[in-house]
Image (cartoon, grey):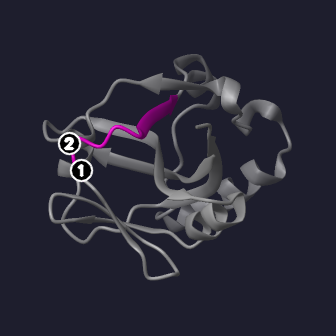
């Protein structure tokens, strides 16, 4: 019986052919004896594009190397119906959009709430994802958790 740490990354980017992509990427890593150990490593994870792969550095100074063939990665995106319901993404780097974002967050409507039922798995190559970012880019880690690995 063991556990893996799970991190969720959210990124918007342009792929090699210039097409805009927006994915949540779930990555499992490590083999821990307890759920607490897995959670501790996941909660401190910093995820970086490095050397043609992904490097996960944790608070315990452990480094996990993830190459382009790593299989414990899942690409997810918001279902088309939900995206249409929500409308275009709001660019938070534009100062004029800050008030709109605040208003959206204060509106407790389910329109902007995204749950597991609103997500779908997407077939996308880890290699293509990695190749879309420059070396040294720090990916946006938005959450962490653990997964139980039965023997």
Q: Residues within 10 Å of mark 1 (few under 14, many from 20)?
A: many
Residue occupying the point 74% across, 38% down: 113
Residue occupying the point 68% across, 30% down: 116
CA separation in Å, label 2 and label 1: 5 Å
Residue 23 image point, x, y percent? 43, 39
Q: Residues within 10 Å of mark 2 (few under 14, many from 20)?
A: some
Residue occupying the point 53% across, 68% down: 95
Identify the image quadrant of the C terminus.
Answer: top right
Q: Circle 2 — which element?
A: helix
Q: Nearer the viewer, residue 19 or 130?
A: 130
- Image quadrant in which you'd find residue 118: top right
Q: In the drawing, does residue 115 fall left or right of residue 130?
A: right
- Confirm whether the magenta stretch covers residue 41: no
Mark seen at residue 113: none
The reply to whether callout 2 and callout 1 are in contact (CB within 8 Å) is yes
Residue 106 image point, x, y percent? 82, 53
Q: Is residue 39 above or below residue 59?
A: above
Residue occupying the point 57% across, 63% down: 42
Mark seen at residue 127: 2
Magenta residues, as a range? Answer: 67-77
Q: Is residue 117 above or below residue 50?
A: above
Q: Circle 1 — which element?
A: helix
Residue at the extreme top: 81
Q: Which residue is mark 1?
A: 130
Q: Is residue 59 above or below residue 68?
A: below
Q: In the drawing, does residue 136 fall left or right of residue 110?
A: left
């Amino acid at each position: 019986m063991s556990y893996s740490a799970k991190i969720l990354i959210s990124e918007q980017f342009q792929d090699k052919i210039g097409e805009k992509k927006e994915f949540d990427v779930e990555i499992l890593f490590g083999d821990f004896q307890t759920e607490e150990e897995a959670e501790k490593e996941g909660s401190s994870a910093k995820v970086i594009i490095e050397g043609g792969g992904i490097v996960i550095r944790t608070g315990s100074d452990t480094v996990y190397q993830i190459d382009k063939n790593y299989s414990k990665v899942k690409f997810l995106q918001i279902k088309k119906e939900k995206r249409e319901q929500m409308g275009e993404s709001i660019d938070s780097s534009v100062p004029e959009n800050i008030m709109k974002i605040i208003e959206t967050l204060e509106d407790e409507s389910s329109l902007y709430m995204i749950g597991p039922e609103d997500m779908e798995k997407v077939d996308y190559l880890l290699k293509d994802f990695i190749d879309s970012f420059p070396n040294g880019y720090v990916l946006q880690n938005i959450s962490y958790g653990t997964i139980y690995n039965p023997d």
